[in-house]
Amino acid sequence: MDNKKQNANTEKEDKLLQLIRDMKFGEVHIYVADGQPVRAEIIKKSVKF
């Protein structure tokens, strides 16, 4: 078996996961700095012709 230590999520990672789980559908852009999510943009509207 693999004996790697699993890291616990940070508060920012938990918030990101909750944001994703709460979305019914759509697209999200995630901005990362120093290995941590710092901002997420939810794309609300897209128009295709």
Image (cartoon, helix red, strand yellow):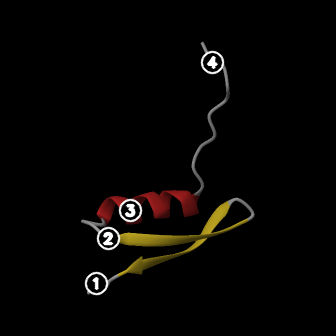
Q: Amino acid at mark 2?
A: Gly
> Pointer 2: residues within 10 angstroms few (<14), some, or many (20+)?
few
Q: Which residue is mark 4?
A: 2
Q: Answer above or below: position of 35 versus 31.
A: above
- Between label 4 and label 2, give the one nearer the viewer: 2
Q: Which disc number belongs to residue 48?
A: 1
Q: Amino acid at mark 4?
A: Asp
Q: Which residue is mark 2?
A: 26
Residue at the image point whose x is 43% and y is 71% from the top: 28
Q: Answer above or below: position of 8 versus 20.
A: above
Residue at the image point whose x is 48% and y is 63% from the top: 16
Q: Secondary structure at mark 3?
A: helix
- Between label 3 and label 1, give the one nearer the viewer: 1
Locate residue 49: give its quadrant.
Answer: bottom left
Looking at the image, tell me whether mark 1 or mark 4 is earlier in sequence order. Answer: 4
Locate residue 35: give its quadrant.
Answer: bottom right
> Pointer 1: residues within 10 angstroms few (<14), some, or many (20+)?
few
The location of residue 15, given as percent across then percent down, is: 47, 63
Q: Secondary structure at mark 4?
A: loop
